[in-house]
């Protein structure tokens, strides 16, 4: 009898202990100060804010910005949580679903920002005065249904990076039409160098390419509301011949790019480009620190940029400068004032300079410098002459994972598993399924 | 006197079960019920509110060609793994059955991959396929065209190879345990009767391994049907949808495509498929066991 009671007690203890272990600890992000009964006193109470971001290459820069921030606000401590980009969305969703409070949330402009903004997790910044420090184009482009839920931090031109030395040796001029670009790529491929570095094992470089090509040949060529029209049922993928053009451009890149593009991932593609095994790469400014790390000599002397010429009309050539990294405050934060102070700091020229020096993307703060990488001299004229456009208003007309899905279908076309028509039909079918949900 | 003792024992049985029952209820029963309610909604996983849509998710599921694609891929993977893992496992077990220093050494070597994290193994093999094997081919002056993980026809086979590498050790260990439970005298009397190695294998070893075969098949099939981390880390279902398995498609639907309700319904159908497969297998193998 006694033994049975003892065993029973032990079992219950084990059960209780395991339940404790399963519990969630939410108090890391909540206030930690002691003795704050009178918060109106001059002495500032210590506050700890929790921040999440996904940009591994920006970690050092962000820490430097926080250091500078702490010189002005020593009482506000910020704990930074770097999460992996591939799972960032999922992790954020899980955190929100379990009511974890994040004070400062970094996001990407576009679908990610829009969905959390619409769901009410981000504080409304539309009427804050510090938003005036940011370029108007950026503020407008990053709005969700007219409201601003985040501060645009940088914009990252997405264009064709090229190897100036290879171009000079072969006597190539910067192409201003699509066929000029393709004849360059074709000649390169025939002579043994890959025209483009393609890291399509990771699907996002292809996804990025097809969506930008779509903006260039569809939205900017007379159908700026195509996405909205699609949602209203006025058009479909299969009925829009411009999508066939986009897929044909994907095929050309595939043909003149490196061997085995589906086996090479993004990092390996960067290796190839930095080593000169591929002459061009369609990417964004975020690759600059990566290229500098791999081949500083190339970065300083032979790296160039030109905007992607998607059509046969040279006057269409404009630089895509789309907002990328944005920073928001959690709507349910218990320290909203302090979080807002940090957001305001992010709009100052001081923070902008730290950002551009360390992370090397173009800051969205008004009048910030472009001199942090030699290749930017190539695109400065486009900024100065206003020949830039932000792709986000077009890309975010269709919400959800439409671009990830069509990329998978395009890959099936590239490996001869589907025809172009089948790709567009399958995409329409997929959209029916997700939109009607 | 007798009845009160019996009912008091029964009371004690019940009290002892209570903690486990409690844990089982809150960690399995209740989430399953909540999950089923989710399948009747159109929740996207983020918004705080959602609508009830009845059984629409299930109807959509049965018309979803990507679901069938994932199902077929999962079955292909499971078939390949189930057959080869058991064949190789049994082969290794028979070869390494006798306890000797050499055999013990090899048993350890073959079992070692089983303790590796699957994610780690996936990463290692990605580089083996993309850099290691080409380098090997280079040394032999042959041209290696492309990493099989990027090749739509070879990707599934490449994945099966990794799974075999990871899990054959466990199968082997279970078979060794089964082999060692067969008494030696049966073999001796068979030899006296004039049976050769092959005959004694098929007429004695295999039948007496009945329980081990059952367990191995059930475990291997379940593990193969539920594969997620291996596929996710190496190909994430690519290229295109060639290596999409049920669990990766489920993950993509629920998290990437923001269709939590639809994904939930898929997971329930998946559960049903797994239960049916397990039941069929047990029935088939148990019947064979009894016959022996």
Image (cartoon, coloured by chain):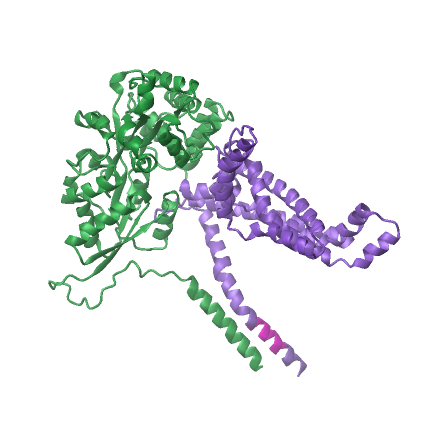
Which of the two residues, B83 or B201, is positioned nearer the viewer here?
B201
Q: Residue furthest bottom?
A: B1
Q: Residue furthest right?
A: B193
| In this rendering, position of residue B31 left or right of residue A355 | right
Which residue is painted at 60% across and 78% down in the image? B8
Which of the two residues, A245 or B275, is positioned nearer the viewer here?
A245
Quadrant position of residue A269: top left
Residue A196 picture location, percent across and down: 38, 25
Which residue is painted at 82% across and 56% down in the image? B186
State the quadrant of the C terminus of chain A: top left
> Which residues lie in the magenta part?
B7-15
Can you see residue B48? yes
State the quadrant of the N terminus of chain A: bottom right
Can you see residue B219? no
| In this rendering, position of residue A342 left or right of residue B187 | left
Which of the two residues, B94 or A78, is positioned nearer the viewer here?
B94
Colour assigned to chain A in the rendering is: green
The secondary structure that most of the magenta stretch takes on is helix
Colour assigned to chain B in the rendering is: purple
Quadrant position of residue A86: top left
Q: Can residue B9 be found in the magenta stretch?
A: yes
Which residue is painted at 25% across and 61% down in the image? A31
- Is A40 located above or below residue B220 in the figure? below
Residue B56 picture location, percent across and down: 47, 41
Q: Can residue B136 be found in the magenta stretch?
A: no
Residue B279 picture location, percent across and down: 64, 50
- Is A134 located above or below residue A329 in the figure? above
Q: What number of labels is visible?
A: 0
């Amino acid at each position: 009898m006694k033994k049975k009671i003892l065993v029973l007690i032990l079992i219950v203890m084990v059960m209780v202990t395991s339940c404790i272990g399963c519990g969630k600890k939410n108090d890391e992000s909540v206030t930690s100060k002691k003795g704050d009964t009178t918060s109106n006193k001059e002495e500032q109470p210590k506050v700890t804010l929790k921040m999440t971001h996904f940009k591994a290459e920006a970690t050092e820069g962000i820490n430097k910005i926080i250091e500078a921030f702490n010189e002005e606000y020593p009482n506000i401590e910020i704990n930074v949580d770097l999460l992996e980009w591939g799972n960032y969305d999922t992790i954020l969703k899980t955190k929100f679903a379990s009511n974890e409070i994040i004070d400062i949330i970094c996001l990407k402009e576009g679908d990610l920002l829009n969905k959390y903004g619409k769901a009410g997790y981000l504080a409304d910044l539309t009427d804050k005065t510090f938003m005036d420090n940011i370029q108007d184009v950026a503020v407008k482009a990053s709005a969700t249904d007219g409201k601003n839920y985040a501060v645009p931090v940088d914009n990252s031109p997405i264009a064709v990076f090229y190897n100036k030395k290879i171009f000079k040796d072969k006597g190539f001029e910067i192409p201003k039409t699509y066929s000029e670009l393709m004849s360059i790529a074709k000649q390169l491929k025939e002579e043994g160098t890959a025209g483009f570095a393609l890291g399509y094992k990771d699907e996002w470089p292809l996804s990025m390419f097809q969506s930008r090509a779509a903006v260039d040949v569809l939205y900017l060529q007379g159908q700026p509301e195509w996405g909205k029209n699609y949602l209203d049922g006025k058009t479909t993928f299969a009925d829009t011949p411009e999508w066939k053009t986009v897929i044909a451009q994907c095929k050309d890149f595939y043909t003149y790019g490196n061997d085995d593009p589906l086996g090479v991932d993004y990092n390996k593609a960067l290796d190839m480009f930095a080593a000169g095994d591929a002459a061009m790469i369609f990417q964004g400014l975020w690759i600059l620190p990566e290229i500098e790390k791999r081949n500083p000599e190339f970065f300083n002397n032979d790296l160039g940029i030109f905007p992607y010429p998607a059509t046969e009309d040279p006057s269409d050539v404009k630089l895509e400068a789309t907002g990328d990294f944005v920073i928001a405050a959690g709507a349910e934060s218990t320290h909203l004032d302090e979080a807002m102070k940090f957001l305001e700091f992010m709009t100052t020229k001081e923070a902008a300079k730290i950002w551009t020096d360390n992370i090397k993307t173009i800051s969205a703060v008004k009048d910030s410098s472009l001199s942090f990488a030699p290749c930017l001299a190539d695109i400065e004229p486009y900024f100065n002459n206003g020949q830039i456009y932000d792709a986000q208003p077009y890309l975010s007309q269709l919400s959800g994972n439409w671009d990830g899905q069509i990329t998978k279908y395009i890959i099936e076309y590239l490996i001869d598993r589907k025809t172009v028509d089948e790709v567009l039909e399958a995409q329409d079918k997929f959209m029916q399924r997700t939109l009607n949900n | 006197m007798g009845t009160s003792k019996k009912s008091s024992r029964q009371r004690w049985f019940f009290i002892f079960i209570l903690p486990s029952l409690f844990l089982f209820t809150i960690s399995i029963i209740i989430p399953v019920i909540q999950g089923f309610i989710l399948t009747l909604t159109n929740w996207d996983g983020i918004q705080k509110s959602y609508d009830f849509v009845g059984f629409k998710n299930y109807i959509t599921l049965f018309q979803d060609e990507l679901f069938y694609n994932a199902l077929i891929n999962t079955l292909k993977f499971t078939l390949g793994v189930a057959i080869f893992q058991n064949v190789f496992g049994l082969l290794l077990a028979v070869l390494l059955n006798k306890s000797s220093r050499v055999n013990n050494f090899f048993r350890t070597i073959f079992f070692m991959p089983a303790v590796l994290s699957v994610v780690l193994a996936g990463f290692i093999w990605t580089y083996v396929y993309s850099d290691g094997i080409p380098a090997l081919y280079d040394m032999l002056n042959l041209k290696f065209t492309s990493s099989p993980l990027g090749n739509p026809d070879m990707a599934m086979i490449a994945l099966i190879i990794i799974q075999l590498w990871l899990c054959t050790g466990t199968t082997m260990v279970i078979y060794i345990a089964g082999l060692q439970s067969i008494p030696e005298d049966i073999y001796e009397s068979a030899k006296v009767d004039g049976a050769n190695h092959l005959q004694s294998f098929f007429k004695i070893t295999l039948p007496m391994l009945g329980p081990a075969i059952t367990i191995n098949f059930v475990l291997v099939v379940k593990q193969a049907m539920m594969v997620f981390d291996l596929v996710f880390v190496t190909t994430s279902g690519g290229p295109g949808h060639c290596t999409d398995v049920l669990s990766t498609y489920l993950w993509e639907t629920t998290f990437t495509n923001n269709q939590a309700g639809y994904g939930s319904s898929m997971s329930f159908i998946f559960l049903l498929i797994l239960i049916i497969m397990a039941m069929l297998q047990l029935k088939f193998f148990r019947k064979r066991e009894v016959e022996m």
